[in-house]
Amino acid sequence: MKRFYKHLSTWMFTSIFLMVLFFVLRMPPWISLVVVAGWGMAIAAEAFDVFGFPGMDPDWEERKIQEEMDKMAEFEAPVEPDLEHMSDSEKEDLEDDLLELDDFKQLRKDWKDSDFV
């Protein structure tokens, strides 16, 4: 890791020096860009070698599976209403909130019961 950071700082200072030098000498800018970009790709390869790909450590898959399982555990199924202990006005309010699937079935006669969730 120490070698990588030394290499990175050397690349940064050398890149700045080359750009200034090529600007002062009025050389074509693509020459400095080729050198800086080529060396930059080597730095990137070294970074992947030292640190690995971002988010892809050996435990990444297990960690993501656990996160998804935790999300699923937080989900609670809707509770069915207790109709026996509800007043008539509460039952009427509940009926108003329910979907009337028969109204939709009449719109298209070729729909099956399995089309409705």
Image (cartoon, helix red, strand yellow):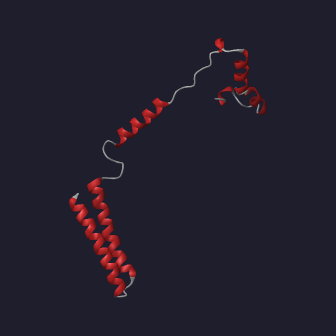
**31 horizontally vs 73: left or right:** left
Q: Where is residue 72 in the image (x, y as percent from the top left)?
A: 47, 32
Q: In this view, does 7 lie above or below 100?
A: below
Residue drawn at 64 percent across, 12 percent down:
85
Q: Position of residue 96 (x, y in %)?
A: 73, 25
Residue drawn at 35 percent across, 86 percent down:
24
Which residue is outermost to the left? 3
Residue drawn at 31 percent across, 79 percent down:
18
Q: Where is residue 78 in the image (x, y as percent from the top left)?
A: 57, 25
User: Looking at the figure, which quarter contains the N terminus?
Assistant: bottom left
How many numbered marks are there? 0
Q: Where is residue 73 in the image (x, y as percent from the top left)?
A: 46, 29
Q: Is residue 60 above or below residue 108?
A: below
Compare residues 56 and 113 and report the one nearer the observer: 56
- Image quarter for residue 89? top right
User: Looking at the figure, which quarter contains the C terminus?
Assistant: top right
**24 horizontally vs 103: left or right:** left
- Image quarter for residue 25? bottom left
Which residue is outermost to the right? 106
Residue drawn at 41 percent across, 37 percent down:
67
**15 horizontally vs 97: left or right:** left
Q: In this view, does 63 lie above or below 93?
A: below
Compare residues 6 and 46 and report the one nearer the observer: 6
- Image quarter for residue 81? top right
Which residue is outermost to the top? 84
